[in-house]
Image: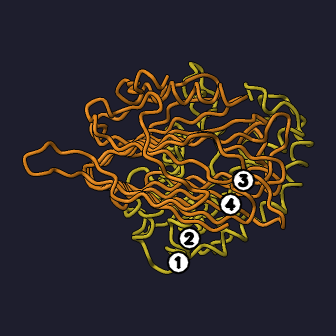
C-alpha cells in the first residue's frame, strides 16, 4: 500500500480576536488517518496555550505490512502549537512477498512554534522488515518533544528487521543524527553495545531554546536510562528496558525533569 | 562490564562485534572523510565533520572523551609535523577527525585512517577486558583476530563513502554504550575515560 498524509497548523489572529492555533491541512490516506482530538493525557508546555491544536494519528489498516510505502508530512507554522499523538501502538508485520515496509516522516517546526509529538510504541513482529525515517527541521526559537519507543517482538517472540533513522536539525545545523538497526542482518544489535538482549528501547528528544544559556544537566534514571544533554539547547532521554511499561516509566521521568509540569487537560468525561 | 554484559571471551567478542558495527563504523567513516577532505585541500570540511560527530554522540561523557583524545593526538601531531590544518581544528576536536587529518598529513589514504579508527574502537575495550576481568590475553587476541574480516569490511565501506556529504555519513546509535559511559562518569573511582 502506498499512502501520503499531511498535517499543517498555523497561528491566526482574527481582527479584534485573540490569536489561536488552527489546523490548516488535515489530509489522510489509509492507513494514515489523522483526526482532530481532545487532549489524550498529560502533555507538556500547553498549560498556557489552551488553543493548542491536537491531532491523533490512527491506523486505518493493519501494519505497516511489508511492501507499504507511507509518507507523513507535518508542518507546524510559525508561532503555532501542535500536539500530535497516536491512538494505539503499531505492529510491524511481514508482507506477503518479503518486501520492506517504510514510513518516512518529514517535519518542519517554524520559528517560535511548538511540536509535542508523543506516538505510541512500535512493535516489531517476527519476520517484519521495516524502515522508519524521521527528519525534523526546527526554525529559530522552535520547541520540540519527540518520543520514540520500539518493542523487540511480541511476547516471547524474536523481532524481525527494523531500522530507525532520526535526524534533527536546528536552523540548518545538525543536532541529533541516530541510526538504529536491530533484528536479523544487523551486526551486534543484541550485544552489550546496543540492546544487551533487552526487549524495549526508546528515546525522547526535547529541544528548548530557553536552554541556550543554561543547558540541562545529565541525570541517571536507573541502570540503563539517562537524561543526556546534547551539544545544543536540547537533551535526549535514552532508555533500554525489559518491557514497555518500564520503558515508558523512564521516558516519562525524563520528560518530567525536562519540561514544565505536564498538565492533564482531558475533559472530565473522557477519563 | 560491571553490569554483567561482558563476562567471558565469547560475550566480549559479541560486544566488540557490536561496537565495530556501530560506533566503530561511525569513527571509521569520519576518519576516512577527514583524511579525504584534507588530501583534496578542503580544510573547511573538518568543521562540518566535527559538528556532525557531535550530533552522533548523544552522551556528554563520550563527547568529552572523544574531544580529550582528539586534543591529545593533536598535541602530538603538532610536534611531529607542522601543517596549517592543526590550527583549523580548534582546541578540542573529535578524535576521529584528528586521526583522519593525521593520516592525511602522514601521506596515508582514507582506508588506512578508517582501519586505524575501527581498530582503535575494538582494541581498547579488549585490553581493558583482559585487565578488569582477568580474561586470557591469548584467547582475547584470538577473538580480535577473528574480527579482522569485519574490521576490513568496515574500513572498505568507510573508504567508499569518504567523499560523501558529512550529513549522510553513518550514524549508528549505541544506546547501551551511551548509558554505560554516563554511568561510569559518575563513579567516584574512574578507571577509564572511554
The mark that comes first in sequence, 4 or 1, is 1
Which chain is mark 4 on?
A: B
Does dot 3 land on a helix, a strand or a loop? strand
Q: Residue at x 57, y 52 (%)?
A: A178
Q: Are marks 2 and 1 in contact (CB under 8 Å)?
A: yes
Kindly report the distance in space between the C-alpha atoms of the residues bearing marks 2 and 1. Answer: 6 Å
Q: Are marks 4 and 3 on the same chain?
A: no
Which chain is mark 1 on?
A: B
The mark that comes first in sequence, 2 or 4, is 2
Kindly report the distance in space between the C-alpha atoms of the residues bearing marks 2 and 3. Answer: 32 Å
Number of the label disc, if any, that sits on residue B35 = 2
Does dot 4 land on a helix, a strand or a loop? helix
Kindly report the distance in space between the C-alpha atoms of the residues bearing marks 1 and 3. Answer: 37 Å
Q: Position of residue A34 (x, y in %)?
A: 49, 52
Per the image, the residue denoted by label 4 is B116
How crowded pointer 1 is (Cα within 10 Å; few <14, some 14-19, many 20+) is rated as some
In front of the other: A102 or B6: A102
Q: Which chain is yellow?
A: B
Q: Position of residue A90 (x, y in %)?
A: 66, 45
Number of the label disc, if any, that sits on residue B39 = 1
Number of the label disc, if any, that sits on residue A162 = 3
Residue B33 left/right relative to B28 = left
| Discs 1/3, front | 3
Kindly report the distance in space between the C-alpha atoms of the residues bearing marks 4 and 3. Answer: 30 Å
Vertical side of B192 occupied by A180: above or below: below
Vertical side of A138 occupied by A244: above or below: above
Amino acid at each position: 500500500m502506498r499512502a501520503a498524509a499531511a498535517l499543517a497548523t498555523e497561528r491566526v489572529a482574527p481582527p479584534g480576536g485573540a490569536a489561536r492555533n488552527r489546523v490548516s491541512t488535515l489530509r489522510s490516506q489509509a492507513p494514515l488517518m489523522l483526526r482532530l482530538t481532545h487532549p489524550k493525557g498529560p502533555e507538556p508546555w500547553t498549560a498556557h496555550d489552551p488553543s493548542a491544536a491536537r491531532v491523533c494519528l490512527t491506523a486505518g489498516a493493519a501494519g505497516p505490512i511489508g511492501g507499504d510505502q507511507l509518507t507523513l508530512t507535518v508542518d507546524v507554522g510559525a508561532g503555532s502549537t501542535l500536539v500530535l499523538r497516536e491512538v494505539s501502538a503499531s505492529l510491524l508485520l511481514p508482507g506477503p512477498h518479503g518486501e520492506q515496509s517504510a514510513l518516512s516522516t518529514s517535519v518542519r517546526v517554524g520559528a517560535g512554534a511548538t511540536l509535542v509529538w508523543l506516538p505510541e510504541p512500535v512493535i516489531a513482529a517476527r519476520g517484519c522488515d521495516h524502515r522508519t525515517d524521521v527528519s525534523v527541521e526546527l526554525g529559530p526559537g522552535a520547541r520540540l518533544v519527540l518520543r520514540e519507543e520500539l518493542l523487540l517482538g511480541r511476547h516471547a517472540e524474536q523481532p524481525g528487521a527494523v531500522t530507525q533513522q532520526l535526524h534533527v536539525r536546528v536552523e540548518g545545523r545538525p543536532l541529533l543524527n541516530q541510526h538504529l538497526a536491530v533484528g536479523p542482518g544487523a551486526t551486534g544489535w543484541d550485544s552489550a553495545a546496543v540492546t544487551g538482549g533487552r526487549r524495549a528501547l526508546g528515546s525522547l528528544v526535547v529541544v528548548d531554546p530557553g536552554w541556550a544559556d543554561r543547558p540541562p544537566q545529565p541525570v541517571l534514571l536507573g541502570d540503563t536510562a539517562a537524561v543526556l544533554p546534547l551539544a545544543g539547547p536540547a537533551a535526549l532521554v535514552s532508555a533500554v528496558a525489559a518491557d514497555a511499561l518500564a520503558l515508558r516509566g523512564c521516558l516519562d521521568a525524563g520528560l518530567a525533569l525536562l519540561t514544565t509540569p505536564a498538565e492533564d487537560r482531558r475533559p472530565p468525561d473522557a477519563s | 562490564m560491571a553490569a554483567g554484559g561482558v563476562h567471558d571471551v565469547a560475550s566480549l567478542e559479541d560486544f566488540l562485534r557490536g561496537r565495530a558495527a556501530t560506533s566503530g563504523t561511525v569513527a571509521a567513516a569520519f576518519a576516512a572523510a577527514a583524511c579525504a577532505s584534507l588530501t583534496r585541500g578542503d580544510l573547511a570540511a573538518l568543521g562540518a565533520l566535527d559538528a556532525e560527530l557531535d550530533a552522533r554522540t548523544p552522551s556528554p561523557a563520550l563527547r568529552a572523551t572523544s574531544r580529550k583524545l582528539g586534543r591529545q593526538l593533536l598535541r602530538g601531531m603538532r610536534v611531529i609535523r607542522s601543517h596549517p590544518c592543526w590550527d583549523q581544528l580548534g582546541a578540542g576536536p573529535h578524535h576521529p577527525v584528528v586521526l583522519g587529518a593525521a593520516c592525511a598529513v602522514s601521506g596515508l589514504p582514507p582506508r588506512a585512517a578508517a582501519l586505524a579508527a575501527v581498530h582503535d574502537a575494538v582494541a581498547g575495550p579488549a585490553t581493558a577486558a583482559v585487565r578488569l576481568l582477568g580474561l586470557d590475553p591469548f584467547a582475547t587476541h584470538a577473538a580480535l583476530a577473528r574480527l579482522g574480516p569485519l574490521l576490513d569490511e568496515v574500513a572498505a565501506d568507510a573508504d567508499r563513502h569518504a567523499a560523501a556529504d558529512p550529513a549522510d555519513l553513518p550514524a549508528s546509535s549505541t544506546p547501551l554504550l551511551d548509558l554505560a559511559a554516563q554511568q561510569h562518569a559518575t563513579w567516584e573511582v574512574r578507571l577509564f575515560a572511554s
